[in-house]
Image (cartoon, grey):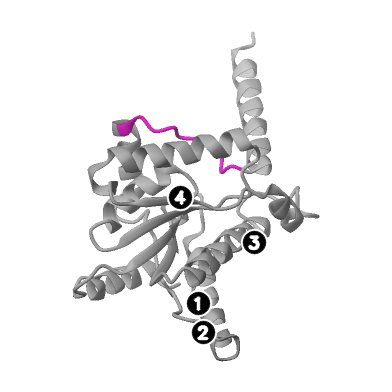
């Protein structure tokens, strides 16, 4: 298995030698996951956070996460220069992707394709707007598969490079490897969430994750009730 954190550090060491900060389009799923990622990256990149998450199950939740992200970038010293851009909220795209796989368990092929859906939109936006790099905050979560995320990112970069001669594409953005949970990254994101009073959701955002969360809660309540029965 590749150690993507080592690859990430190698990229950062090269970037530290640059005279000017390169631009980075950083896909974000929520503010808590973004917090530590921005803390790590803000000194090296000119960052735009790209909030594209058609998997989120309702517009209220979508707007709540986006508002927290916007608030955080106005309050955290290291994120004051970070720009936030919201992609389209198009849940129909997510449901079309998930069709026929609604009852698969979390962390399976439906989740893989959800990663790809969001990273593909990020890569396209980065290409269209001339970014030097693109990446995602998703790897900070212990519930997300960092190997999949990095493999998808590399694949998308290769696809853009392969299409360049025929499509007349401009500068191809480089995928920035990541495994932000390393070196206590996830723990640090929790600390920052507490420091800034961030809203921390307890499901990934999709209706399937919420369904599994509710089922788990129900089972836990039933188990406790059973244990307390005479």
Cα separation, mark 1 vs mark 3, equals 17 Å
Q: Is residue 202 visible?
A: no
First in sequence: mark 4 vs mark 3: 3
Q: How far apart are marks 2 and 4 (CA)?
A: 31 Å
Between marks 2 and 1, how big is the CA–CA gap? 6 Å
Q: Earlier in the sequence, mark 1 or mark 3?
A: 3
Give the magenta range: 196-205
Residue 226 appears in which quarter of the rendering? top right
Numbered circle sitting on residue 113 = 3
Q: Quarter of the image holding residue 31?
A: top left
| CA separation in Å, label 4 and label 1 | 25 Å
Residue 151 position (above or below residue 214): below
Q: Nearer the viewer, mark 4 or mark 3?
A: 3
- Label 3 Cα neighbours within 10 Å, binned few <14 / some 14-19 / many ≥20: some
**Is the C-beta separation of discs 2 and 1 under 8 Å?**
yes
The residue lying toward the viewer, choosing from 167 and 108, is 167
What is the x, y in percent for residue 216? 63, 33
Magenta includes 161? no
* Residue that mark 2 sits on: 161
Marks 2 and 4, the one that precedes in the sequence = 4
| Res 173 visible | yes
Residue carrying label 1: 157
In front: label 2 or label 3: 2
For the N terminus, the image quarter is bottom left
Q: Which residue is drawn at 68% across and 57% down?
A: 110
Q: Is the magenta stretch mostly helix, strand or loop?
A: loop
Quarter of the picture containing the C terminus is: top right
Expressed as whole percent of the image width and height from the top left, the position of residue 205 reads 59, 42
Q: Mark 4 points at which residue?
A: 142
């Amino acid at each position: 298995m590749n150690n993507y954190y080592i690859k990430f550090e190698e990229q950062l060491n090269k970037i530290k030698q640059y005279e000017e900060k390169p631009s980075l389009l950083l896909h974000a799923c929520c503010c808590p996951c973004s917090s530590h990622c921005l803390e790590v990256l803000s000194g090296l990149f000119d960052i735009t956070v790209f909030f594209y998450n058609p998997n989120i199950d309702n517009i209220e939740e979508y707007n709540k996460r986006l508002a927290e992200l916007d608030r955080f970038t106005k309050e955290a010293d290291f994120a004051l220069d970070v720009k936030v851009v919201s992609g389209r909220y198009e849940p129909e795209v997510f449901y079309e992707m998930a069709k026929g796989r609604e009852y698969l368990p979390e962390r399976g092929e439906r989740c893989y394709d959800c990663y790809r859906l969001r990273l593909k939109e990020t890569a396209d936006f980065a290409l269209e707007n001339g970014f030097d790099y693109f990446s995602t905050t998703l790897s900070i979560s212990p519930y997300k598969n960092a190997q999949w995320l990095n493999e998808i990112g590399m694949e998308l970069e290769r696809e853009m490079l392969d299409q360049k001669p025929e499509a007349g594409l401009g500068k191809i953005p480089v995928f920035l490897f990541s495994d932000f949970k390393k070196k206590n990254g996830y723990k640090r994101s929790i600390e920052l969430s507490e420091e800034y009073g961030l809203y921390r959701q307890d499901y990934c955002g999709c209706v399937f994750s919420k369904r599994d969360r509710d089922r788990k809660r129900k089972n836990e309540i039933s188990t406790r009730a059973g244990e307390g029965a005479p």
